[in-house]
Image: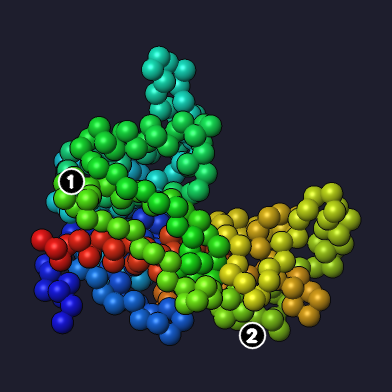
Amino acid sequence: MDQATNLEKIKVASLFCGCGGMDLGIQGDFNFLEKQYPQLPFEVVYAADNDSYATQIYNSNFSHKCELKDVRDIVASELPDHDILLGGFPCQSFSIIAQNPPRLGYKDERGKLFFEMVKVLKEKQPRFFIGENVKGLLSANGGKAFPMIVKEFENVGYHIHYRLLNSSEFGIPQKRERVFIVGFRDFDDYFNFRFPLPNTLNGSKIKLKQVIDKKANKDDKWFFSQKAVDGMLRVREKMNKGRVQDLEQPCNTISSHLAKVSLNGTDPVLMIDERYRRLTPREAARIQSFPESFRLDIVSENRQYRAIGNAVPPVLMWHVANALRKILVLF
């Protein structure tokens, strides 16, 4: 028997939880492409997000419920005790303030949200935290922002590991690269932790064609009009747009823009029988590694695209969480 089955549940608080990609991944017990991702010894005891549509999806898929709340309104001392804090904090707004020494600042309200996560860590001092963000965080502000972000975490008592992970190397049909930041209050935990290694067999990766809905190939609803195609073709060479995907490879990164996907944009599109078509919300969910059982249809298709595009792939999160589980059995 796996030692993890004897562990007491490790309590998790989830900020910026969205529709629940990180939360599903850290709890486990789901299937994707006929592979079972076993239950992990983690239990979400608190979740919050400020997007009412994402929280509707979340609350239709989890027995525990997400609170519709702006993270800035959370009183850290009132949160339930937890061992792990999760947060895919927004990052678009970081800047380096021209002070001596320079300090981490923000360009607009979104830039403050990172500090809300730091505030909770300072108050509650959980054993671990896991943060997730876009690849660009590493190079923001000429590479100056990320070391300052790490310093903020260190200043409230955490030892930091971070790694850029590519979803396509972990059984996910998407070339999504994301930075994972894992913080440890105790040095022994920090010393023993190792990020998961890529697990694609002999370099083989899940192909996009494995998650395409063949029924959608026969539905005109998903295809672009001839007018849209003609407009794209007129400027294609100059704009280098029209991102047709190779069905034999993992998909390019999907985003929350899929609801407004354009042939003149950078979001992935399909070429089916010489016709361009968009991805369906369910295909987008599969590309993100959500199981078929994950409900989306309680909100509009536009809101489904947005929630799925903003999510953390559950399978990728499962691998990070499983790596964390491995150090728990050492103590």
Amino acid beneath label 1: Phe
Image coordinates for residue 234, horizontal then vertical, percent = 89, 56
From the viewer's perspective, tell me whether residue 307 is left or right of residue 128. right
Is residue 299 something that shows in the picture?
A: no
Q: Quadrant of residue 160?
A: top left
Q: Position of residue 184 (x, y in %)?
A: 22, 47
The disc, 1 or 2, on the residue closer to the chain's N-terminal end is 1
Give the residue at the far front of this rendering.
202
Q: Which residue is the site of mark 1?
A: 187
Pinpoint residue 3: horizontal percent, then vertical percent. Answer: 15, 74
The quarter of the displayed image where residue 265 is located: bottom right
Q: Mark 2: which secondary structure? A: loop
Q: Are marks 1 and 2 in contact (CB under 8 Å)?
A: no
In the picture, the quarter occupied by the N terminus is bottom left
- Mark yes or no: residue 104 visible: yes
Q: Residue at x 60, y 74 (%)?
A: 208
Q: Quadrant of the C terminus?
A: bottom left
Q: Which mark is residue 313?
A: none
In the rendered image, residue 197, in percent from the top left (x then y), is placed at 39, 64
Circle nearer the viewer, 1 or 2: 1
Front residue of this view, candidates 195 and 290: 195
The label on residue 215 is 2
